[in-house]
Image (cartoon, rainbow, N blue to C red):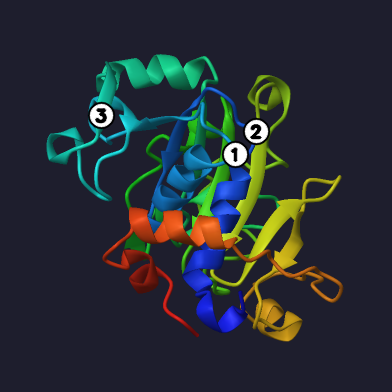
Amino acid sequence: MTLQTISRADICVAAVSDAFKGSGEVLAHAVGIVPAIGVRLAKATHTPELALSDGEAFMMAEAPPLLKTAAAGGTPEAWVPFRSIFDIVASGRRHSMMGASQIDRHGNQNISSIGDWRQPKRQLIGVRGAPGNTVNHRVDYWVAKHSARIFVDRVDVASGVGNDRATGTAGRFHDLGVIVTNLAVFGYDDAGLVKVDSIHPGVTPEELQEATGFPIDATDAPLTREPTPDELKIIAAEDPKGLRHREVPEP
């Protein structure tokens, strides 16, 4: 299968799927089109014990159509009202891939506001569940449009706890995994700093550095793997309308 028949969005979906490999029997929480397809791919292939939610109040044995709830189809297997989610989070039985308006070199994430928090230039959605997620269970991030405005030297507000802040009680269950973007996949080095794990086919190290607001080294980074033919069939079946291509257009 050549690169010409595999889209950048498909490569991102496979990278998301790989992030959930080995997660076990936990609730998969995914924010975004590509992450939603990625967790479905993970459940259909290497990690069938993943628990999926319809986004409202049901655990699903078979997921409903993309962006739909159990009312639109699928096979509900358990009722999990919103109040129960807090128990799942606190017990660590969850694996989340969240979005980010800013991420810094330590993995701190901001979804709250841009600028001085006392008088922000732009108000966003608030810290929401990011602090609790990042101190209780595995957290990855998805960034559909990688840019130096998102990858910054220091976040304006630390919504999600980064590696430099995860000390004492906050660090006991702190587990930052990977950052998947439309350009690359990142992990963290032994010092807790963001590093390049792989670079997507067609992206140059220079392009990646220009889009990142702090120094990175992608010189010897391997290419992000392409999905297999079987995985591509699953991806297409889960996203027949091609919504992933709207979230990650071809460069």
Q: Quadrant of the N terminus?
A: bottom right
Residues 228 and 156: in front is 228
Residues at marks 2 and 3 touching, judged by CB atoms closer than 8 Å: no
Q: Which mark is residue 46?
A: 1
The answer to whether residue 12 is left or right of residue 213 is left
Determine which residue is flagged by label 3. Answer: 75
Residue 235 horizontal/vertical position (percent): 43, 57
Residues at marks 2 and 1 touching, judged by CB atoms closer than 8 Å: yes
Q: Is residue 35 visible?
A: yes
**Mark-to-mark CA distance, 2 and 3:** 23 Å
Give above or below for 2 relative to 199: below
Looking at the image, is mark 3 or mark 1 earlier in the sequence?
1
Q: Which mark is residue 168?
A: none
**Mark-to-mark CA distance, 2 and 1:** 8 Å
For marks 2 and 1, give the one nearer the viewer.
1
**Mark-to-mark CA distance, 3 and 1:** 20 Å
Give above or below for 3 relative to 26: below
